[in-house]
Image (spheres, rainbow, N blue to C red):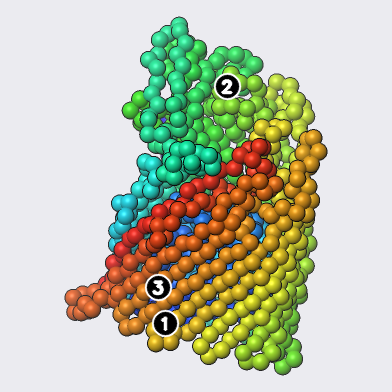
Amino acid sequence: MRTHKLHPVTLAMIAMLSTTYVYAEETTDLGKITVTGEGDKLGTGLMIDEDTPKAKSTVTKAQLDKTRSSANAFQDLNLLPGVNATSQDGSGMAGGNLRVRGFNSDQMGFTIDGAPVNDSGSFAVYPQEFTDKENMCELFVTQGSTDTEAPHVGASGGNIGMTTCGAESKGRWRFAQSLGALDYRRTFLRYDTGKIGNFKGYLSYSNSKVDKWRGEGVSQREHMDGRAEYDLGGGSKLSAGLMANYLMNHQYRALYLDQVKSLGYNADYSTVRPTHQTPVSGSAQTDTLSGDYYDYERNPFQNVLLTLKANLQLSEKTRLDIEPYYWYGYGGTTYPTVVSESSNASYVGGGVADINGDGDVRDKVAVLTGSMTRTDRPGVNVKMTHYMDNHKIMGGFWLEQAYHKQTRPITTFSNDGHTDFWLDDNLLKYQNGSTYQGRNWKTISTGKSVFVQDTMDLLDSKMQVTPAISYREIKRDFTNTANVGTASASATSSRGYGYADYRITRTYQEVLPGVSGTYQFNEAVQGFAGVSTNFRAPGNYDYGNLVKTYSGTVATSLYPVTVKPETSTNIDIGTRFRGDWYKASLTAFYVAFKDRIAASYDPDTGITHDWNVGSSTIKGLELEGGTAPYKGFSVYGSLSYTKSTLDENMPSSTGYYDTKGKIFPDTPEWMASASVQWASGPYMINLAAKYTGRRYLTLENDVDIGGYTLVDLNAAWKLPLSSSWGFKNPVLRLNVSNLLDRKYLIANSGSGSNVTINDTVGSPKVYTGAPRFASMTFQVDF
């Protein structure tokens, strides 16, 4: 019987209707549509007047509004210094990966309006799940130092934040329709209530679809955002925000390098649908899989994020912010496999029952399986800020408890391809009637932090010094329920690593001090420097597959959990230059890792898990600058040099791997970007280029892929249509990704720090880069 799930859009509407009072924390109203926008006054929308005592770069709404509406956050960050972002398609709907100064996305904290959205188990980030671009006001990255108050226990690098826009003060409807190559279609609709007394709010909905550029399949996305705000007066506000996403994507196939050569640049999954042998009682039938069938290689996922905020001005000098949140997610990845029927009492649950209904348990039957995860994640951030003489003192805490259920069930499919891609209907059973599982884990992760910092204003406000300290902790309570494990999807294989029941609890904690500051040499030049310590706990995946010996279905001994937390010390020293017509910054950085974590294939166990690859060092320089418009022209550019090396030889079962002094995988030494824009009256045209240097694919640096340069085109025209027609601000936009149609390769690091030791131990895979992709959008207000 199907387990009923509420569609995220339904959950969103229920939550919005049940919310009485809500807020907007000092975010920016969307305002009127313009072609250039306020952010284009400097650096084409890719710079603002930063004043933080650390390296930080910002993408403004002006830049977000000119790029493709379906582009994900990783793509929008790609021009900034230190950022190496990739995506498997031009639309952005297939997701992608991100590295900043060599830190992978799962080593950086990611927040939406202050709520953490990294996976609570692995800390991975999936950017295609997040807020619609039309509702985003700012996207920023701190390249090295994690903010003291940031709610993270998995960020040894910096943090990335998305800030959504507040509701409009005047009521209106906004409609946008996009069409493009690969049958790209996207519809966006938003309604703002306008001010009703002290209340205002909005609700938006989008529906997007695009065909894959190689192979068969589509990416489909439905999304809803909402916000409501109530002004209490005196600087105090209440608010609620809601984000809901529904995703059903076909996956792109990762290829070995020799497969790119032998199968071709556009190679993908098979289009031959597997079928079943006719069941015959008393004899054995064996289904075969001729290749991974594209329609069964999917990524279904739905998620909801609810944020509530009480931002209270207690007195002229004291402010209290209380911000609870709740994250829900369900989904994963699916793929076909073959399972053997059995009635052996020594197998989990007595073996798999009759699958094809022929009355025997002799057959090997093709089925659909996948790694599915459900997460329920409530939490709260509390922060108090108090001004006293020349001090700004901030302190508070963060607390959350994430419930993470990870399974690998199996369902059947018919010869015509009908099946349940959510893997919650018509599930296979063991002989004892329980549900078959190739993975059956429950993790309760309790995260907490306490922090305090003091920003001191010195030397007649020329200098600011900010000492800070935080305590961060996560407790993992992991339960493995007997399952087939990683040995095979077949119940007739040897007893899997997860065969027995067991429970593990681990607590990781760290005290993280830091100090930073700025000095204003004159009106045009500001210096900044800082040293901070960061901390990343191991993910929960290493608690699975640990059974060493067992009695019945209870583990009597386990393989030890050997991975240790990753810590880093980050040093930034830089200078900012501020002239009448330009802004620029230059930053030197040094990062010292201890017990750096990377996931890789283990030839001794035959599985992929986390390793401590030893000490590691990252050092480099970052330069960015932008101009104000001159006769309509403005320019932005960034240049990054990053040297990320392993300081030790990584141990193996027979000695050591040759990793000392090697460059960390997927970390180019050189990157450069440039954005040139001309805007005048109703017209805007923007060309943006990004160079990404050579990257290694293994820890031993025996495989690499070449550098590449991509050019994108963005253009807009505010149409000369009269408002007497009943609408306002009609804008037509053109977006072209990979304008020169370059071919290139990107590393298959997935959503996390998954690397390969060398070309012999688990050969690395790559994705081929997406070709030219063009789309147009018409947007209008009513």
233 w.r.t. 211: above or below: below
Q: Quadrant of the N terminus?
A: top left
Q: Is residue 520 visible?
A: yes
Q: Is residue 298 visible?
A: no
Query: Which tag, 3 or 2, sits closer to the chain's start?
Result: 2
**Horizontal and vertical percent for residue 631?**
39, 87
Query: Which tag, 1 or 3, sits closer to the chain's start?
Result: 1
Give me the residue at 65% from left, 87% from top.
525
Q: Nearer the viewer, mark 3 or mark 2?
A: 3
**What residue is disc 3 on?**
686
**What residue is disc 2 on?**
491
Is residue 255 shown left or right of residue 216?
Answer: right
52 w.r.t. 274: above or below: below
Q: State the residue in front, 365 or 354.
A: 365
User: Gap between marks 1 and 2, in whole Å?
Assistant: 66 Å
**Horizontal and vertical percent for residue 39?**
46, 79
**What residue is disc 1 on?**
633
